[in-house]
Image: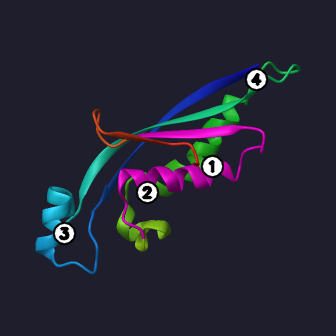
Amino acid sequence: MRLTVHRKAHFNAAHRLFKKEWDDAKNEAVFGKCSNPNFHGHNYELTVSVTGEIDPETGFVMDLKILKDLIYNEVEQSFDHKNLNVEVEEFKTLNPTAENIAVVIWNKLRDNLRADLDLMVTLYETPRNFVTYKGE
C-alpha cells in the first residue's frame, strides 16, 4: 500500500523576474511589475509530499521529523530572507520564477531521499498562484 505524507513550510524571499539580454521595456512587457529593478518579495508557502510504502516496523512512509529537518536545511536556510537573484547560487543564472524555484527545491530534496520514495513539491507564490513539480 502506497501512501503520501505532507510537510508544510514557508520562507520569505525577494526576487526579480527578468532576462539580462532584454532591455527594461521588454522585461516589463513580459514580466510586468515582477521585473521591478529594485526587486519585490513574496511569503512563499511550500508543501513537500513524499509517497511510498508504509514501513511495517515504524508505520511511517518517512519520519516527518527527518523531512522537517531536510526542508529546513536545504530550503529554508538557503532561501529565507534572501534576495534569490543575488544570494542563491542557482538563481544567479536562472530566472527565479515560481516554476524554477519549485524545480530547484525538488532537486535539493530529491538527492536526500531514498530512491523508492516519490517526491512532489507544491510552491505557493501567492495564495492564488502556485506550481507543482513531481520531477517529470
Q: Nearer the viewer, mark 3 or mark 1?
A: 3
The N terminus appears in which quarter of the rendering? top right
Looking at the image, is 103 positioned above or below residue 134?
below
Q: Please name the amino acid that badge 3 sits on.
A: Asn
Q: Please name the amino acid that badge 4 sits on.
A: Phe
Q: Please name the amino acid that badge 1 sits on.
A: Leu
Say few, some or many: other residues with alpha carbon within 10 Å of mark 4 (under 14 / 14 to 19 / 20 or more). Answer: some
Q: Nearer the viewer, mark 2 or mark 4?
A: 2
**Is the residue under label 4 in contact with that under label 3 (CB below 8 Å)?**
no
Q: Is residue 25 left or right of residue 38?
A: left
Lower position in the chain sequence, tag 3 or tag 1:
3
Colouring used for the render: rainbow
Q: Is residue 16 magenta?
A: no
Q: Is residue 113 magenta?
A: yes
The x and y percentages for residue 131 are 40, 42
**Which residue was labeled with disc 4?**
60
Quarter of the figure with residue 101: bottom left
**Which residue was labeled with disc 2?**
100
Distance from disc 3 to disc 1, alpha carbons, whole Å, reads: 31 Å
**Is the residue under label 4 in contact with that under label 2 (CB below 8 Å)?**
no
Lower position in the chain sequence, tag 4 or tag 1:
4
Q: Is residue 32 left or right of residue 7?
A: left
Lower position in the chain sequence, tag 2 or tag 4:
4
**Which residue was labeled with disc 1?**
109
